[in-house]
Image (cartoon, rainbow, N blue to C red):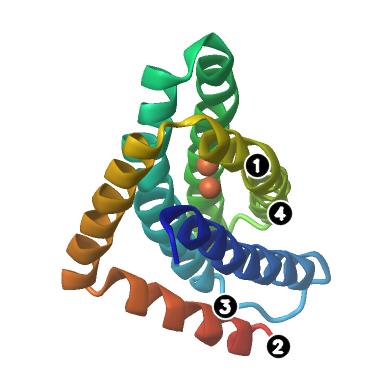
Amino acid sequence: MNYIELMVEEHSNIKRVLSVIRKYCYKVLKNEEVNYADFFILIDFVRNYADKHHHGKEEKLLFDRMIKELGPTAEKLVRNGMLVEHDMGRLYMQELETAVNNVLKGEDEARLDIIANAISYTHLLYRHIEKEDNVVYQFAQKNLSSETQQILEKECDQFEQEAKTKNTQSKYISMIAELEEKVK
Ligand SMILES: [Fe+2]
Ligand SMILES: [Fe+2]
């Protein structure tokens, strides 16, 4: 698996959790019994797997090379598109966390803010992932020099090895299945 295939696979893992988030929100909407603390597990997944682990490789490695090597079109695509969307995702998670805390403090109306922020995050990420899979990654693969691709391959591998020492991949991959089971 090359570094692009790896990141596309991570997108699939992230999409599985987006589907879990939607299911949790539907339970909230229907006022079914929900363990609201489970939202903290979802937030942990988003912050540490989707953001730190996956966006980490994009921001520090791939996008950085694209900006340096591929000129103004790539720079615009990355800075005004992808990076802005990563930031919007962070904001939704911050507001989601606040909403969950407010619900746990007894503020029933904050259930609305849970749904609004969590669902907005899923919509944002579905669109974002589609753009990366079909446009951004393809653009990078077609236009980055083969030398740069080899460097990226090595850097991504190193990034993965470092994450492995903290069990990041295994921890969050098994978390996905557990979450799917919980929300069945
Ligand atoms: Fe991204
Ligand atoms: Fe991505």
Q: Which mark is residue 29?
A: none
**Mark 2: few/some/many CA within 10 Å (<14, 14-19, 20+):** few
Secondary structure beneath dot 4 equals: helix
Give, as a three-letter code, the residue at label 3: Asn
In the image, is 167 to the left or to the right of 104? left
Look at mark 3 in the image and give the residue it sits on: 35
Check the image and report above or below for 11 versus 90: below
Q: Earlier in the sequence, mark 2 or mark 4?
A: 4
Q: Which mark is residue 184?
A: 2
**Mark 1: few/some/many CA within 10 Å (<14, 14-19, 20+):** some
Residue 137: x percent and y percent? 57, 42
Quarter of the figure with residue 81: top right
- C-alpha span from label 2 to label 4: 18 Å
Look at mark 1 in the image and give the residue it sits on: 128
What residue occupies the far top of the structure in this picture? 72
Secondary structure beneath dot 2 equals: loop
- C-alpha span from label 1 to label 3: 29 Å
Image quadrant occupied by the C terminus: bottom right
Q: Earlier in the sequence, mark 3 or mark 4?
A: 3
Look at mark 4 in the image and give the residue it sits on: 115
Q: Is 142 in front, or is 120?
A: 142
Whether tag 3 and tag 4 are in contact, CB under 8 A, the answer is no
State the residue at coordinates (52%, 25%): 78
**Mark 4: few/some/many CA within 10 Å (<14, 14-19, 20+):** many
Q: Is 114 in front, or is 64?
A: 64
Q: Earlier in the sequence, mark 4 or mark 1?
A: 4
The answer to whether the residue bearing label 1 lies less than 8 angstroms from the nearest atom of ligand 1 is yes
Give, as a three-letter code, the residue at label 4: Ile
Check the image and report above or below for 145 versus 113: above
State the residue at coordinates (46%, 62%): 6
Q: Nearer the viewer, mark 2 or mark 3?
A: 2
- How many numbered discs? 4
